[in-house]
Image (spheres, rainbow, N blue to C red):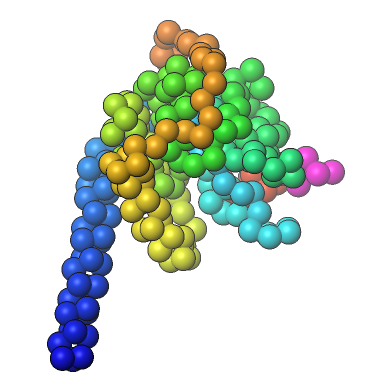
Amino acid sequence: MLKRLFYSLLVIIGLTLLAALSLDRWMSWKTAPYVYDELQDLPYRQVGVVLGTAKYYRTGVINQYYLYRIQGALNAYNSGKVNYLLLSGDNAQTSYNEPMTMRRDLIAAGVDPADIVLDYAGFRTLDSIVRTRKVFDTNDFIIITQRFHCERALFIALHMGIQAQCYAVPSPKNMMTVRIREFGARLGALADVYIFKREPRFLGPLVPIPALHEVPEDAQAYPAVTPEQLLEIQKKEKK
């Protein structure tokens, strides 16, 4: 009896895991047409939404995910692929401010402050994506983050009827822990949109981002910005 119960439990666990893995792969498949790995293939849009993350893993150790996102934002902006950068991140504590940190680094790297818009209430990916539409009045934009994050963000956008593409910036080589966490985050995103039908924690008044109506002629010419160059910029900023 106990042996039969044990095997039944294993079957249930196995089927549950298989279903979860299938949902994970389905999300990747569904969003694949909207993910761009190469900057030259990225379509022009007025707004690029940079999804926030911590700049440091711990004191003095920079987060490579952050560094690659800033690099991607600079490349998209300098190439003329986007005209404005909407920096969306967590600002729940006075000592932790993702949008302002990104803003400082982007300005230090040459981005015009007038082309930067801050979203301090991007507490979750869902908040960042939906607020871009409902608060900043932008329904067709470029998301800038790593590919695994692109897929979840785009899935939320598609479900909400929001048009978006994603520029998939590189990921650090050792990302197993992050990918495992992402697996759980995807299941959470599915529950948010299909079961709980969640909305952003905060919305607020409409704040449209200024629109540019012409595509720059040099939208295909883009200077590369490497992580090493970014580190040099940040070192100069500290001096």
Judged left or right of residue 85, residue 29 is left
For the residue pair 238 and 152, the one nearer the viewer reads as 152
Residue under the point 49% across and 20% down: 135
Main SS class of the magenta portion in the image = helix
Instruction: Measuring from the top left, give residue 151's x and y in whole percent.
Output: 34, 45
| Residue 50 shows in this picture | no
Q: Where on the picture, by quarter, is residue 89?
A: top right
Q: Quadrant of the N terminus?
A: bottom left
Residue most toward the top? Answer: 213
Instruction: Measuring from the top left, give residue 149's x and y in whole percent.
Output: 41, 47
Instruction: Measuring from the top left, give residue 221's x and y in whole percent.
Output: 45, 27
Residue under the point 24% across and 38% down: 33
For the residue pair 177 and 203, the one nearer the viewer reads as 203
Image: 113 above or below 157: above
For the residue pair 53 and 95, the one nearer the viewer reads as 95
Residue under the point 84% across and 43% down: 239
Residue under the point 15% across and 87% down: 4
Judged left or right of residue 124, residue 237 is right
Q: Is residue 37 magenta?
A: no
Q: Which stretch did the figure color magenta? A: 234-239
Q: Is residue 235 magenta?
A: yes
| Residue 150 shows in this picture | yes
